[in-house]
Amino acid sequence: MHPLFSVLVSRPELVMDHVAGYAALAQEEAASMGGAVTRRAIAWAACGVCALLFVLLAGVAVMLGAVTDGFHWALLLVPAVPLAGTGVAWGIARKQLPSRAFAELRAQLDADVQALRTLGGRP
């Protein structure tokens, strides 16, 4: 009989602890991946809002510049703020997601499969 079955029969709490560890590891890795996706989505939304705000304020600045007789530094500074926000949000949104999702969980599964094969007598 395979050693796994004898452990299942004699010490089921060990197997349940092991399965609970897998569940916790999967939840941890899913949460970290979900956070990265959420951050990117928020950054893309902020990038769009800031770009729209820049275009709107730049248009207002052009119209105000056309009807006034002098140049004022605020006509450049006010649209520059959302433009800078667009650049920052763009940089955050373009970051790569983690290259290998659930890599630690896969490595743990591979190690367990190898251990079971060794216990069962297969290489």
Image: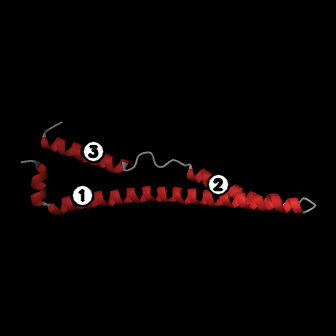
Q: Nearer the viewer, residue 108 or 80?
A: 80
Residue 5 visible to an observer of this rendering: yes
Q: Residue at x 18, y 41 (%)?
A: 118
Label 3, label 2: how far apart the Cα atoms are: 40 Å
Counting every numbered tag in the picture gives 3
Q: Dot 1 lies on which element? A: helix
Q: How far across and down, in percent of the image, does residue 21 sit? A: 29, 59
Q: Amino acid at mark 2?
A: Val
Label 2, label 1: how far apart the Cα atoms are: 43 Å
Mark linked to residue 71: none
Q: Nearer the viewer, residue 101 or 77?
A: 77
Q: Residue at x 27, y 44 (%)?
A: 110
Q: Nearer the viewer, residue 64 or 81?
A: 64
Q: Amino acid at mark 3?
A: Asp
The residue tagged 1 is 18
Mark linked to residue 88: 2
